[in-house]
Image (tube, rainbow, N blue to C red):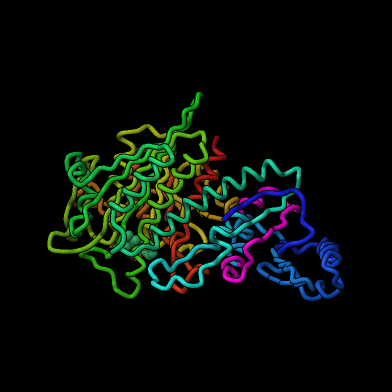
């Protein structure tokens, strides 16, 4: 699809016009009515600009105008959602050439609108053999024109570039997340990273099973034991060629390509959703890919421990004690608490080999965070108030919300082991996301700016794309916004 910016609203052509619910609405509708030669009272009667409301209006010559409601005070995520939903729902009907008039709005809106429009073209049906009904608007024929205010032209140009970059990378991550385990494994993630690093100019190193054994990443290896596919540690580094002091941000993402639970096997009812247990990896790999393409002035290191959590005769068993990369030992109480185990090696590898100023790990870590926050916010765990505020603000700005949870030491009692340095599960159905965070804290080497994001409820969720939960791409916009504003 070709996207262009213009500063002059056209007299003809098919047009989408967004409207807020405000005192200005009647006047704005009168102007539209005049242009279309309609009585204003009809538009005013039929269109209230509720969030998501759509009123298609046709002129005698067949010109389409879609009035799109945004509600009272839409935030960036509301703009994105309304546009995504409109374009997704109508994608097979849309004309090849379509304009969107955002000239009455700030350029900040442009990024959300473009993300929404591009997002609306997503197709979950990767493996359907009948490819009929694909949208022409989203094909090579499609042309989208955005009308922006002349004063906003430069900022809108930037917003457009950002949105296209994020949308492209996010889509690749959605495909990886939605891919079933017979179409993806740790090597698939590694291959994607190697290829993206070559294309976009950042370095990617993959430690294969032999290298993991040689370097002693015993925690990652222990989770992978029951699987036929070998594990990998993906190490990504982006450092722009620029003068001046760059801040170094270390990102660690859980990359479990399928989580059966291992010997502590999950019940089957929703086990198929566990193909999505690599949402942290997607956020980390996606963020670095976007940052590199946008040349952001920051030094990023991404670590993705990638493995399947499966089960066979050689699986790690409950009660086993394993030795991590750092030398610390873990008593495995429940093999389904595997995310924190591989992150112990991910964090250890990052902190022993690099000197990041900030460390953020992201993981689809616990069902318990879903019990606490539902599907509306990720759990944020950190002892650093400044980092907490920065991440919370990035969450509000992008709509990828995070909510701070406690990290008090009393919760550490739950994961004391009699036989090893720590155990991976308290054995109690209480405060599970917090004891998981305390476990990770034990491997954070007392770093003063470490944060953990439990994104279990956010990475895979209900969307308009399908009837079952599917990937959201959560974390990329959050982290890009955080990086933008930390400097
Ligand atoms: N990948 C799961 C967490 C999860 C659950 C993600 C639901 C997305 C949706 C994780 O590995 C897991 O199994 N956690 C267990 C931990 C428990 C055994 C201590 C959980 O939350 O039940
Ligand atoms: Mn698990
Ligand atoms: Zn898991």
Q: Is residue 99 magenta?
A: yes
Q: On the picture, is 435 further left or further right than 418?
A: right
In the rendering, at what x and y percent does residue 47 appear?
A: 76, 72
First to last magenta residue range? 86-112
Q: Quadrant of residue 435?
A: bottom left
In the rendering, at what x and y percent does residue 109 appear?
A: 66, 52
- Nearest the camera: 176 or 461? 176
In the rendering, at what x and y percent does residue 19 appear?
A: 74, 62
Q: Quadrant of residue 152?
A: top right
Q: Decide: is 54 above or below 142.
A: below
Q: Decide: is 250 above or below 467.
A: above
Q: Is residue 430 visible?
A: no
Q: Decide: is 111 above or below 41.
A: above
Q: The C terminus appears in which quarter of the rendering? A: top right
Residue visible at 51% across and 42% down? 385
Q: On the picture, is 461 further left or further right than 341?
A: right
- Nearest the camera: 272 or 124? 124
Q: On the picture, is 138 further left or further right than 191?
A: right
Q: Is residue 373 magenta?
A: no
Q: On the picture, is 371 further left or further right than 271?
A: right
């Amino acid at each position: 699809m070709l996207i262009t910016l213009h500063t002059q609203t056209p007299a003809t052509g098919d047009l989408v016009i967004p409207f807020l619910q405000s005192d200005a609405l009647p006047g704005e509708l009168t102007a539209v009515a005049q242009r279309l030669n309609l009585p204003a009272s009809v538009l005013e009667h039929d269109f209230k600009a509720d969030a998501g409301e759509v009123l298609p209006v046709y002129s005698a010559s067949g010109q389409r105008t879609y009035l799109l409601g945004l509600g009272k005070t839409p935030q960036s995520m509301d703009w994105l959602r309304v546009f995504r939903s409109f374009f997704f729902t109508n994608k097979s009907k849309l004309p090849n050439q379509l304009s969107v008039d955002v000239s009455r709005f700030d350029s900040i809106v442009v990024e959300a609108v473009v993300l929404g429009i591009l997002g609306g073209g997503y197709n979950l049906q990767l493996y359907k053999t009948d490819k009929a009904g694909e949208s022409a608007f989203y094909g090579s024929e499609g042309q989208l024109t955005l009308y922006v205010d002349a004063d906003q032209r430069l900022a809108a140009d930037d917003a457009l570039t950002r949105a296209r970059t994020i949308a492209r990378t996010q889509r690749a991550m959605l495909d990886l997340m939605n891919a079933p385990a017979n179409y993806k494994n740790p090597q698939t993630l590694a291959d994607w990273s190697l290829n993206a690093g070559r294309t976009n100019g950042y370095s990617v190193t993959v430690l294969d099973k032999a290298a993991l054994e040689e370097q002693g990443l015993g925690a990652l290896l222990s989770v992978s034991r029951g699987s036929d596919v070998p594990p990998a540690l993906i190490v990504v580094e982006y450092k722009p060629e620029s003068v001046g002091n760059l801040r170094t941000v270390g990102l660690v993402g859980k990359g479990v390509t399928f989580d059966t639970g291992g010997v502590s096997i999950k019940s089957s009812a929703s086990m198929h959703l566990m193909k999505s247990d690599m949402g942290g990896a997607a956020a980390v790999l996606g963020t670095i890919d976007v940052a590199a393409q946008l040349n952001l002035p920051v030094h990023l290191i991404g670590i993705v421990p990638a493995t399947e959590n499966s089960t066979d005769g050689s699986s790690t068993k409950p009660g086993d004690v394993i030795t991590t990369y750092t030398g610390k030992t873990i008593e495995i109480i429940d093999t389904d608490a595997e995310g924190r185990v591989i992150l112990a090696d991910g964090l250890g590898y990052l902190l022993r080999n690099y000197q990041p100023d900030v460390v953020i790990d992201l993981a689809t870590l616990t069902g318990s965070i879903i019990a606490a926050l539902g599907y509306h916010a990720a759990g944020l765990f950190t002892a650093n108030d400044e980092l907490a505020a920065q991440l919370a603000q990035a969450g509000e700005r992008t709509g990828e919300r995070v909510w701070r949870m406690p990290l008090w030491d009393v919760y550490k009692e739950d994961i004391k082991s009699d036989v090893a340095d720590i155990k991976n599960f308290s054995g109690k159905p209480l405060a599970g996301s917090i004891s998981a965070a305390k476990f990770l804290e034990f491997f954070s080497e007392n770093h003063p700016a470490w944060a953990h994001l439990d994104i279990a409820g956010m990475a895979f969720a209900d969307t308009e794309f399908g009837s079952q939960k599917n990937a959201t791409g959560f974390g990329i916009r959050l982290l890009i916004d955080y990086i933008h504003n930390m400097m």
